[in-house]
Amino acid sequence: MEVIKRKKLKEKIIEKFFLICALVAVISVLAITFFVFYNGLKPFVTNSYPFWNFISGVEWRPGSNMYGIFYMIVGSVFATIGAIIIGVPIAILTAVFIAEMASSRIGKIIRFAVELLAGIPSVLYGVFGLGIIVPYVLKISPMAQGESLLATILVLAIMILPTVISISETSISAVPKAYREGSYALGASKIQTIFKVVIPAARSGIMTGVILGIGRAIGETIAVMLVCGNPIAGIPTSLFDQIRPLTTNIALEMGYASGVHQQLLYSTGVVLFVFIMIINVIVNKLVKVRVDI
């Protein structure tokens, strides 16, 4: 009996330990959310800075008490959409090739390259973009700079590849063989089976990879900072215009900002936080709707 009691006691202790570990993630999210929102909402409550001027302004000039982030929001949205348009199709087709078409040897080589790509520090992506992509953009740009929305899109498109590829490949590989065999039995070709059966069956996992890719694109800072140009004003109207994403605005100025300036940088973080949450909710809703259909 004593042995059984000891085992039960050990199991309870282990369960409590696991619970504590699980709560760390929840507490971390709550702590970060509270800290960002508490500091980010201060300037609109205690200092009475007009929220509309902040959210709709197109100039960021702390010395002139001008803190508009609308042009940053537009730049972030354009860069993210562009990276998704370029990166996601490449990533999904790569995942399909690894999981369905490549031989084991070639698949291992490509998978290793993808894993290596995932392990490269963000700053090296930025250095690559600054040294390779920016000069090429400068050659075709009608403007006198290579740092631009286009350069940002290309860097982000490369950066989201490993995330989307890895998760998509896992989801595609997890599709039961019976699905493929049933499709072949009905006379479908391999390509038809992949695009009509396998990919729809793996849609949920693929969309999860896309969501994480979107989060990576929106939240990237260092690499983007080196290639985007970081102007103090101006909504981008072409691929060759410079942009200033929300993330780089925070990173560039948080080190020396103080007072209202610092609080409004936290407010920028609040907008970024809400922006990411809205995108995640929308994409998750779309996935559920497609799965139900």
Image: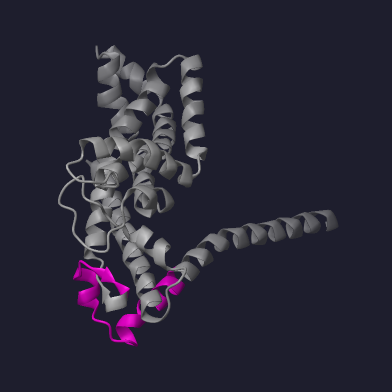
Q: Main secondary structure of the magenta part?
A: helix
Give the total number of marks visible in the rendering: 0
- Residue 263, image quadrant: bottom left
Q: In the image, what residue occupies the spot 46% across and 73% down?
A: 35
The answer to whether 192 is drawn above or below residue 234 in the figure is above
Where residue 149 sits: x, y (%)? Answer: 25, 47
Q: In the image, what residue occupies the spot 26% across and 39% down?
A: 138
53 drawn magenta: yes
Q: Is residue 132 left or right of residue 11?
A: left
Front residue of this view, candidates 1 and 224:
224
* Whether residue 141 can be seen here: yes
The answer to whether 256 is drawn above or below residue 16 in the figure is below
Where residue 128 sits: x, y (%)? Answer: 42, 38
The answer to whether 149 is drawn above or below residue 250 in the figure is above
* Whether residue 288 can be seen here: no
| Residue bounds of the magenta highlight | 33-62
Which quadrant is home to the N terminus? bottom right
